[in-house]
Amino acid sequence: MSCKKVYITTPIYYVNDSAHIGHAYTTIIADTIARYSKLLGYDTFLLTGTDEHGQKIEQSAKKKGKSPKEYADEISKTFKDLWDDFGIEYDYFIRTTDDKHKQGVKFAFQKMFEKGDIYKGKYSGNYCVSCESFFTDTQLIDGSGCPDCGKETSIIEEESYFFRLSKYQDRLLEHYKNNPDFILPASKRNEVIAFVESGLKDLSITRTSFDWGIKLPENMNEPKHVMYVWLDALLNYLTALGYGGNGEKMDYWPAKIHIVGKDILRFHAIYWPAFLMSLDLPLPHHIGAHGWWTRDGQKMSKSIGNVVKPREVVEAYGLDTFRYFLLREVPFGQDGDFSEKALINRINGDLGNSLGNLLNRVIGMGGKYFNYKFSSDLSLFQNELEKVDDIVSKLESYIFQMQTHRYLEEIWEILAIGNRTIQSSEPWVKIKSNPDEVEALLVFVSNLLVRVSILLYPVMPNSSKKMAEALGIEISPENYDRFIRNRELLNSFEITKIPALFPKVDKPKMGQAPKREEKREIAEEGLITIDKFFEVKIRVGEILEVEEIPKSKKLYRLQVNLGEERPRQIVAGIKEFYKKEELLNTLVCVVANLKPAKLMGHISEGMLLAVRDSQGLSLIRPEHRREVGSPIS
């Protein structure tokens, strides 16, 4: 058994509000990878916690008539209680108000200062309190709006210490080049590289305009300064291991993966590696950035009342089904949409019909025909077993590349093999004429379910344990070795009858969904809000292939690179206006979140932007060469 050490982290969650579906998604992904890592026999350390300093916390506490620490204590506890109730197997819950963390942050600051990477100066810039970030004039919306959250920024002028971020620009670009999977998914990598290539400026890392933060090392004699919240927060990944103290867990560093939301990717993929370089520490293996969640196709908002509260979903439908839905519903890195209808469809379809029904069939026929005990060799099913072995051999790579949806899709293919084999064998017919073949079938399907119960454990731990108990096995690293790595098969089973794991859901359990905002139509203008406009995702694409569609005078079939794992196929009616050679390897603007449609029998996964007037049709293109996948706003 391997003794490899694996360190997995969530971001530390900012204590300005209670946990929502995005927090749960991040934490469940991390917990899933940690559980899988433990199944492999690795010495695994999972970190989560809360980020509790900064001007925003100070202001929120004041509004509620509390001290910042009292306010942070209250909100931090709600996160910890939720993860405890959800069975998250974290090894340490860190708070940035912990003395151990403060000590480590001061140690790191002193080390970077002594290296010459921190210097004193004055800062003037556009500051967003909500995002705890500075922005240049060119980044602002309408001259003063934050480009990340849209809220009003304010100009701050104050004495500050700076980190020499610009010094590490070339080293960062070199690292991205030499480690192409440092940022996952690959589509996010280009965004980070483009930002760094545009030029890094030194980073202001202290504040004097508020007091709620970690003070500078005492020997610097700077009582007015507190550290920038992102310097403070990012260092939690080290201080949790004892950095700056006794270093009792530092052998877990570097981290296998930091899992973050896409809104904080820049801090983790640029600032954090630069800080580590300054501290002469190795960089994490991967930074995985996931997308955001909407509800019923609409952005979540307190004012609308459509924020998905994880505890409410779990109380209505169960923890394992919630975990499965989050990890299966959306590819990692893309935005996802939560709807109760989609969740019910997953429960009744994937979980009830495919998984639960297969287990019920084995238990039902095993009890009816063989009194729950059956044995046989598996020679009749060698072809099916080879297909299953091929699927299983790919699964580990999907987990550590953050492709949990692919991991689950492949497991469901194993279940499909089992269900198809039962259907084609018709055991209810053969039991009278050939009971031995029926017995062999049950042994075969039971072996599939043994593997599935182990493989599903990281995603659905409670349901998987119940499956395994019904089949007479335990879920453990030893059995992972036996049945997954070594592909061992059991020739006999004594199964136990259990209640249905996934009863059918006939109607929603969470009450009526919140009403959508009233649409205020201005007929003569047809105006829309800026939020409505931003629902349309337009990206820069490069045309890689152009094919004519037989019998069509207008349509080309294009393969367009949007910086994703595979090119998009787009069917476009531009044949009358462009020759194939005029399109090949050129840039276009693509509506990237359009529902796929079928045109003359060909699937089209997007739409090109164009203008048509009396002179004909012309594609809308970027004025200069731009990175494929870049968003257009």
Image (cartoon, rainbow, N blue to C red):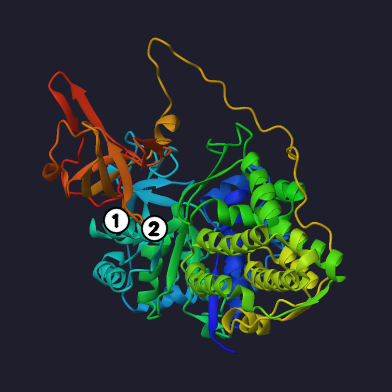
Residue type indicated by callout 1: Phe
Disc number for residue 367: none
Q: Nearer the viewer, residue 429 or 329?
A: 429
Q: Is residue 208 visible?
A: no
Where is residue 579? Give x, y as percent.
12, 39
Q: Is residue 350 left or right of residue 497?
A: left
Question: Residue at position x 77%, y 66% from top?
Answer: 433
Query: Which residue, given by chain and number where applicable, does mark 1 sit on?
Result: 195
SS at circle 1:
helix
SS at circle 2:
helix
**Given contact means CB atoms under 8 Å apart, are the residues at marks 1 and 2 in contact?**
yes
Task: Count residues near mark 2 (Cα–Cα under 10 Å), then give few for <14, some for 14-19, many for 20+.
Answer: some
Query: Which residue, given by chain and number where applicable, does mark 2 sit on?
Result: 266
Say whether disc 1 or disc 2 marks the residue closer to the N-terminus: 1
Q: Nearer the viewer, residue 392 or 167?
A: 392
Which quadrant of the rendered structure holds the N terminus? bottom right
- Residue furthest out toward the top: 524
Q: Is residue 620 left or right of residue 510?
A: left
- Residue furthest out toward the right: 371
- Residue furthest out toward the front: 433
Residue type indicated by callout 2: Arg
Q: Is residue 162 left or right of residue 425?
A: left
Q: Nearer the viewer, residue 49 or 117?
A: 49
Instruction: Determine whether 493 is above or below 61 in the image.
Output: below
Q: Is residue 626 visible?
A: yes
Question: Residue at position x 67%, y 85% from top?
Answer: 478
Where is residue 177? Give x, y as percent.
27, 70
Where is residue 147? Give x, y as percent.
38, 43
Question: Residue at position x 39%, y 58% from top?
Answer: 266
Where is residue 105? Give x, y as percent.
50, 72
